[in-house]
Image (spheres, rainbow, N blue to C red):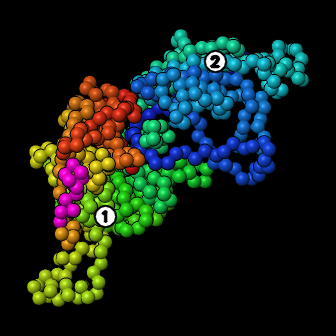
Amino acid sequence: MRTMRPRRDASLALGVLAVLTALACSSAIAPAQNADKKTDLAIRPEFREPIVLTSKDGVLEVRLTARQGRATLDTVATPVQNFLLFDYEVILGTASNGQKSGGNLYPAPTLQVFPGERLIVHFENGLTGLTIRDYFIPQYTAKDQPVPLYPEQMTSSPINLHTHGAHISPRGNADNVMLHIPPGMSNTYTYDIPRNIPGAPGKPAEVRLYDANGDRFVGTVIPFPGYEENVNVAMGDVDGDGVLDLIVGAGKDHSPEVAVYAGASIRGKGTFGTELARFQPFDSQARGGVSVAAAQIDGTNSDNIIVGSGPGVPSEVKVYQIPLASSSSTGPALFATFKPYGDDRYGVSVATGFVDFSTGRESIVTAPGQGSPAEVKVFAFPLFKPIAEAEAKLHAKADHVGMHATDNMHATDEPMNTASFTPFGEDYRGGVSLATGWLAGSLGGAKRIIVSKLADSGSIKIFSSGSALDGGPSLYLQNPEHHGHGAQFREIASFEPFGGPAGTRVATTSTTTGANLLVSGVAPGGTDASVIKYDLVRPNAQATTLDAVRLGQVWSGKASAPPALGGD
């Protein structure tokens, strides 16, 4: 008997994860064509990804119904009759379109689960009363018997669900290829995805993207095929189109590569489907990983790409200009480079944000890698140029006192170190995760700096350069001539969300009133990882610190280390 499969066996997406939780744009949806309108078939709308149904808390349970119906396709002007369509209902899990149920789908939804998780599919056969003229019974003709010129048409059909390459047992109601579900009947398939499935490990590291508005799953990107370790992620508008793009830096034991993907759909490739650039900011032998960030640093309208080197080479930060180069052999032009920790070789993590009102510029926030005291530093590029008269006076003064004229002048490609602090004391050397964001944005002030331990208890601390907690930013109390001297940062919140020894990672995602905090970590026991969203609130009008209030879980899965995070 012929078996019918939804979208080539309801494709299972399996892999190692890095989680990107903040996304400013939603997928572009091409409108369905109307039969009453003339259609120019030479003009094709964008390709659209099928709806993706994704596991939650280690389980994806769905109901799929196969039936005949009328389909509206992008490739023809009028709806097509007698088409194989699918309906779905999410019982446990999430849908990329935010809808728990849907119908009239072609192709069927993608079912996405991961190693160690369970997939439950209640598969219903509604293929009765079929009127497909060329849907013939596929039976063989007996030896020496005439082959019918017009085989009998099928008016109903059995169906089956089957996977390829997942190494799932066919016992019972699992991956049993011999089952055929009669019309009007259903079967429940239960797939326990092996933890040691080929490709896990061995599956390329995958970046998963979520829309912060409702934590809706948007899509996936595999930036470095064949690379199985964790990666570093960030978001920024690097091509200047007003849509956030994805920047991915390779992790350890990979060439120091950076890949950039367009957040907008270009040439029908879908969101994050177009690679804008791919380059190596450091020598190919530097295989300690690349930290990435994005912000407007050089005074142009687009975000610059900022990278930090990994351990094993002199710690260095580089700032790249726009436009990006599409060739893999040449990267963007270099705007600036500096070494925030001198000859340190422990690597450097980077984050960016408008954290200091006194500079009027977006800042680059840095921290050294594991093995070095965790001193957070803040840098800004003034970008000012002296007018001719002032420059002449400065040169005259320099000649008079025997100094160089540039001693009191910062070139546009040289940063100023405006602040520094040790969030966990001088003795902590376990490395940190960095982020910035307008947490508790209604209190005003610049973005906060968030720092979390990559080791020990995963303690998280949040620092501010001034807000309503302090009566306002400190620069309001200063002479305007002193505003360029840098801000003082004060700890305004501290908590330990997981309590295990695996550490935590942090990011933020924008809201209409500021930002929420995202934290990834591993529960005690070392096998269950998750990403949690928090709001930071002022407990009362007199309080000078904030409390972290859990809003919900964005993602969960099996992992022994906190997934990397990036946000807007």
Q: Horizontal and vertical percent for residue 294?
A: 37, 56
Tell me which segment is drawn in magenta: 465-478
- What residue appears at the point 34 percent right and 58 percent down from the top-left corner? 306
- Report whether residue 278 is seen: no
Q: Is residue 273 left or right of residue 515?
A: right
Q: Is residue 386 magenta?
A: no
Tell me the amino acid under the disc marked 2.
Glu
- What residue appears at the point 60 percent right and 19 percent down from the top-left corner? 123
2 vs 1, front mark: 1
- What residue appears at the point 39 percent right and 53 percent down from the top-left corner? 257
Specify the farthest residue to the top.
172
Q: Horizontal and vertical percent for residue 564?
A: 34, 41
- Report whether residue 134 is seen: yes
- What residue appears at the point 52 percent right and 12 percent down from the top-left corner? 171
Q: Is residue 353 left or right of residue 182?
A: left
Q: Which mark is residue 71?
A: none
- For disc 2, the marked residue is 124
Tell me the amino acid under the disc marked 1.
Arg
Q: Which mark sits nearer the N-terminus, 2 or 1?
A: 2
Q: Horizontal and vertical percent for residue 75?
A: 73, 44
Taking depth in this image into account, of 241 and 473 the one nearest to the observer is: 473
| Element at label 1 | loop
- For disc 1, the marked residue is 361
Q: Is residue 475 magenta?
A: yes
Q: Horizontal and vertical percent for residue 327?
A: 49, 61
**Would you place residue 515 above or below residue 97 in this image?**
below
| Element at label 2 | strand
**Would you place residue 535 above or below residue 332 in this image?**
above
